[in-house]
Image (spheres, rainbow, N blue to C red):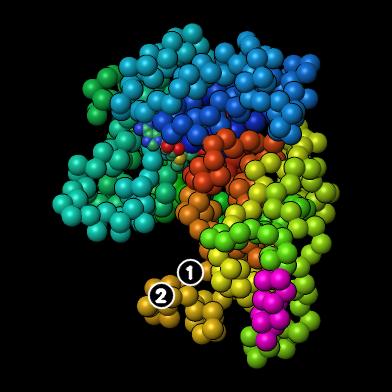
Amino acid sequence: METGEVLVIDLFAGPGGLGEGVSSCVHENGNKPFQIGVSVEKEPSAHKTLTTRAFYRKIIETEDGLSSYQSYLYNELTRSELFDRFPIQAAEAQQETLFKPHALGADNKDIHERIRELVNAHGEKPKVVIGGPPCQAYSMAGRSRNAGIKDYVAKKDLRHFLYKEYLKVLSIAQPDVFIMENVRGILSAKVDGEIMFPRILKDLRSPGRITKIATPRYKVFSLVVGTENVNNPSYDDPTDFLIKAENYGVPQARHRVILLGVRADVEGVPRTLARRKRQTTVDQVLSDLPKLRSGFSKRKDEVKEWERAVSKNGTQVKKLLRKQFKNAQDLDLKPFKRLNRSEIQPVTHPEKMPIHLIQWYRNNAPTSVLNHETRGHMESDLLRYAFSAAYTKLSGGTSPKARDFPDALAPEHENWKSGAHADRFRTQAANKCSTTVTSHISKDGHYFIHYDPKQCRSLTVREAARLQTFPDNYKFEGNRTQQYVQVGNAVPPYLAQQIGKVVLELLS
Ligand SMILES: C[S@@+](CC[C@H](N)C(=O)[O-])C[C@H]1O[C@@H](n2cnc3c(N)ncnc32)[C@H](O)[C@@H]1O
């Protein structure tokens, strides 16, 4: 296949995880067939990230592209100085993300017009639509939040029906293949007592029924369970569409519904994803990153004070854990030497990382460690973090529940030990894959405590991005909270690449 032969239309694109994975696929002849034509995103910081990455993909093959991009990463060039150096690629990247954030539904005129232009220009060559309509309304957390809203009427919550915007684009572009990602909650979500998922599947199989535009039919395949009936694929259980990312080399338990739609006239059957024998663990992908101290929130952030607090905590944590773990005394909890909160410098050699992931993360590196800066925490939480991380280490990888915390460390929650807060603090164990990185990580970090008890902190954006398998030179724009949200929302690019390969084989 030729470079750019497959047009990709990326909807609800977030920071571009799905697009990154798919567009990185290489055909056996060495070409990169997937070319993103448009990425539609309404949130400004994610849109900025998308534009930066689109621009990066365009300049990377030029003579000074990589070195200029790296100067930007090292803060030696501003973003506009960088874009000014490559005006043609900058204009193309901006066009790729429609010059500004756009919302499907509200800004359809611009969005549909651009998609029509691209599709017409692409002629008979293959096209792919990717992306997942947002999930708040049918995500578990969303549902319990909604239950508390007076007069909440699911039917009127437009987010339930954003997938219909997806159908409209399917009718306009009539792609050979679509990839639709969503949260697990989509399988059981109900509106007016009706389970939505069978209806969503039915609509995706014949989008024209809803959009009233003549549209070919689609076969919807699972990427993890095979089917006998290839002309009309059907599955016994809706969970057959659930992909567990940890089985495919992603160092994170992330369970998402991913539907692969294939236009009825496209011949061939997509294969299922190849499971990896071993899961990738947290320390395999984080241990080479520079050690950082956390900061203090709600008080002056001073290194000396942090050292004092951490030394004191170390002694207390050992005392608290002595009864449960004989080897608690042996823990080294002394503060480490270089007490930085952020670091821009080349990563050290990732000794524990599997080779295929070294290549994946390094991409076009030598790169600096980007977006690797710690947050400030309350002094009382530093002690809880140290306790939680030390407990996890001594227990061989089990993060303590609320009941495992000594009373001295109980936060001021009325029902702290009732079970409702059992997982209030969760250390991501070094020797396991992590739990799901969600956008909740932007809030307080309590669920995402670093496994090293000496660092007493939650994960940085870069660490979360590693768990999500973003390459190290993927720059997240916006403020730190926005960066966390972007990372938590994405499809792991490494998983997306594997899905892209399945599509590539089908289209070849
Ligand atoms: C789950 S994220 C998508 C992640 C993306 N597929 C990836 O791999 O990075 C959903 C995104 O849809 C965006 N969004 C929500 N409603 C939208 C709309 N009406 N039009 C465009 N984008 C929207 C959100 O801002 C969010 O970034």
Residue 95 vertical position relative to residue 391 in the rendered view, above or below: above
Q: Which residue is mark 1?
A: 424
Residue 396 part of the magenta segment:
no
Identify residue type, mark 2: His
Bin the neighbour count of mark 2 within 10 Å (Cα to Cα): few under 14, some 14-19, many 20 and up: few
Residue 477 vertical position relative to residue 143 in the rendered view, above or below: above
Label 1 sits on a secondary structure element that is: loop
* Visible residue check, residue 141: yes
Query: Would residue 149 appear left or right of 266 to someone viewing this image?
Result: left
At x 61%, y 48%, the residue is 461
At x 44%, y 47%, the residue is 257
Where, by quadrant of the figure, is residue 391 drawn? bottom right
Magenta span of residues: 308-319
Query: Would residue 455 appear left or right of 269 to someone viewing this image?
Result: right
Identify residue type, mark 1: Arg
Q: Which residue is mark 2?
A: 413
Residue 311 part of the magenta segment:
yes
In percent of width and height, residue 227 lies at 46, 45
Instruction: Indicate which quadrant contains ligand 1.
Output: top left
What secondary structure is the magenta-colored segment mainly?
helix
* Contact, mark 1 vs mark 2 (Cβ under 8 Å): yes
Bin the neighbour count of mark 1 within 10 Å (Cα to Cα): few under 14, some 14-19, many 20 and up: some
At x 30%, y 32%, the residue is 164
Query: Would residue 220 appear left or right of 331 to someone viewing this image?
Result: left
In percent of width and height, residue 92 lies at 57, 14
Q: Which of the two residues, 307 or 368, is positioned nearer the viewer here?
A: 307
Number of numbered discs on residues: 2
Q: Which of the two residues, 79 or 42, is positioned nearer the viewer here?
A: 79
Query: How far apart, in angstroms, are the residues tagged by discs 1 and 2?
Result: 10 Å
